[in-house]
Image (cartoon, rainbow, N blue to C red):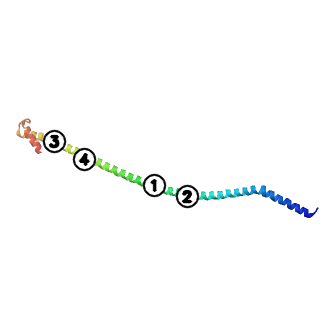
Amino acid sequence: MNINATLIGQAIWFALFVFFCMKFVWPPISRALDERKQKIAEGLSAADRAERDLELAQEKATANLKESKEKAAEIIDQANRRANQIVEEAKDAARTEGERLIAKAQSEIDQQVNQAREQLRKDVAVLALNGAEKVLGNEVNQDAHTQLLEQLAAEL
């Protein structure tokens, strides 16, 4: 065998092998590599978007938390103001009720004082009649002297 013929034969078979690989093997491999490259790029892009979305979500959560704390503080402040208002209303109601009870008690006291005065006047009139009867020695006619007794009771 001749080395030149072998070398040329091998070169031809190598050229056919390269042509076959370029025509049938290389395109699917190239396509798979391109698809893989595209998927990696999409994955990196999705990761960047997810990172941005995470930052936005954290900012939004922080803003919501701050707003919630402000609302809670406002609600607590309103509750404290309402509690103070209720306490003041209760104090006013108690003060009004106390004044009413004092006025009622004062009225009852005045009424009892007047009744006691009337009773005392009657008792004094009876004592005065008894005293006058004893001094005069005879019985004083109460029916005859009713007007005089009423004047005496009014003066007392």
Which residue type carries mark 2?
Leu
Front position among marks 1 and 2: 2
Q: Mark 1 or mark 3, which has the lower sequence index?
A: 1
Q: Which mark is residue 4?
A: none
Quarter location, residue 51: bottom right
Give the residue type at disc 3.
Glu
Distance between the Cα atoms at labels 3 and 2? 91 Å
Q: Measure how far apart labels 4 and 2 are at the Cα level.
A: 69 Å
Name the image quarter holding the N terminus: bottom right
**Mark 1 against mark 3, which lies toward the viewer?**
1
In the displayed structure, does residue 114 sit left or right of residue 148? right
Q: Amino acid at mark 1?
A: Lys
Question: Between disc 4 and disc 1, whose residue precedes?
Answer: 1
Q: CA distance from mark 4 to mark 1?
A: 47 Å
Q: Quadrant of residue 156?
A: top left
Nearest to the eye among marks 4 and 2: give it: 2
User: Which is more N-terminal, label 4 or label 3?
Assistant: 4
Q: Amino acid under label 4?
A: Ala
The residue lying at 61 percent from left, 59 percent from top is: 48
**Residue 141: image x %, image y %?**
7, 35
Q: Indicate the secondary structure of the residue bearing disc 3.
A: helix
Distance in Å between CA atoms under marks 3 and 4: 22 Å
**Residue that appears at 84% across and 60% down:** 14
Q: Which residue is mark 1?
A: 71
Disc 4 to disc 2: CB gap under 8 Å: no
Q: Position of residue 60 (x, y in %)?
A: 53, 57
Q: Which residue is mark 2?
A: 56
Residue on which disc 3 sits: 118
The residue depicted at 74 percent of the width and 57 percent of the height is 30
At numbered mark 2, what does the secondary structure look like: helix, strand or loop? helix
Cα separation, mark 1 vs mark 2, equals 22 Å
**CB within 8 Å, label 3 to label 4:** no
